[in-house]
Image: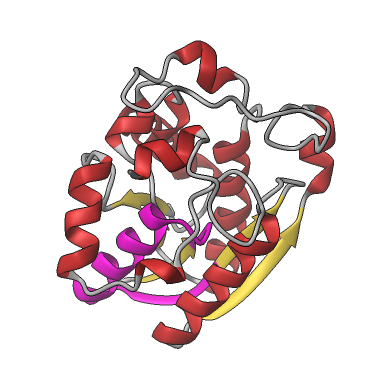
Amino acid sequence: MPDAIALLSGGLDSAVSLSIALRKGIKVKEAVTFDYGQKAVRQEIRCARRICRKYHIRHQVFDIRWLGRLSPNALIDRNKSLPSPRPGSAITKEISRQVWIPNRNALFINIAAAMAEARGYQHIITGFNLEEARNFPDNSIDFINAINITLRYSTLNKVKVVSFTGRMDKKAIMRRARMLKINLSDTWSCYQGGRKPCGRCESCLRRG
């Protein structure tokens, strides 16, 4: 089976996608978490490290806080309040745009692709999902297919992005997490960086 590197935010989706990859026999050699200045970065890194220890995977954190400085929105700026949609209401594109980071996932993938080629890995494991793809196009299957075309040209070993959660919504991902016996307390989905998830931000509401 191919070797791989995982993009691991410490969240539910990336944890489930990683676990599925391992169950399929993919040898995930290392995982990467990015610090782009997000409010929840400490919690995300803590959870990602905990997940990596569980699976005996090497973990690295990349400092790309310059990305957050390009777009200091509510996800980054401590002086700006995160949008808090009403529970049960639709999460609109206008709400999601308040936490949009320009070209974020493409940048993550390209950094991981450079590492993958240098180390001889064939796959990049990501935790995208169908539900968020409706408002965040860089979570979609179309995006994965498109960036895989570019990677055929930009990597000599034709690194490929794979997301085992890409066609699942949050409810399906949660069911799979329970099937895989993933400890949910080892994951962090909240946009805030407090001691406990806020329960009000878009990401908390999606997780349910």
> Farthest residue in the top direction?
94
Residue 84, percent across and down? Answer: 54, 27
Relative to 65, residue 115 above or below? below
Question: Is 29 on the left-hand or right-hand side of 32?
Answer: left
- Residue at x 27%, y 49% (from the top left corner): 165
Task: Using residue 198 as the reference point, say whether residue 175 is left or right of it.
Answer: left
As displayed, is residue 99 above or below residue 205? above
**Residue 132 picture quarter:** top left
Please say whether residue 28 is visible from this viewpoint: yes
Residue at the location (33% across, 43% down)? 208
Q: Is residue 78 above or below residue 172?
A: above
Specify start and end residues of the magenta stretch as a single range.
Answer: 7-31
Looking at the rendering, in which quadrant would you find the N terminus? bottom left
Of residues 183 and 169, the one drawn nearer to the viewer in this rendering:
183
Residue 28 lies within the magenta run? yes
Q: How is the image coloured?
A: secondary structure
Q: Is 4 within the magenta? A: no
Q: Which of 114/195 is in front?
A: 195
> How many numbered marks are there?
0
| Residue at image coords 52%, 22% | 96
Can you see residue 1? no
Q: Nearer the viewer, residue 29 or 189?
A: 189
Residue 170: % across, % down: 27, 42
Quadrant of the image occupied by residue 148: top left
Where residue 98 sits: x, y (%)? Answer: 62, 21
Q: Please provide percent x and percent y for residue 114.
A: 61, 57
Q: Relative to 63, say whether 167 is above or below.
A: above
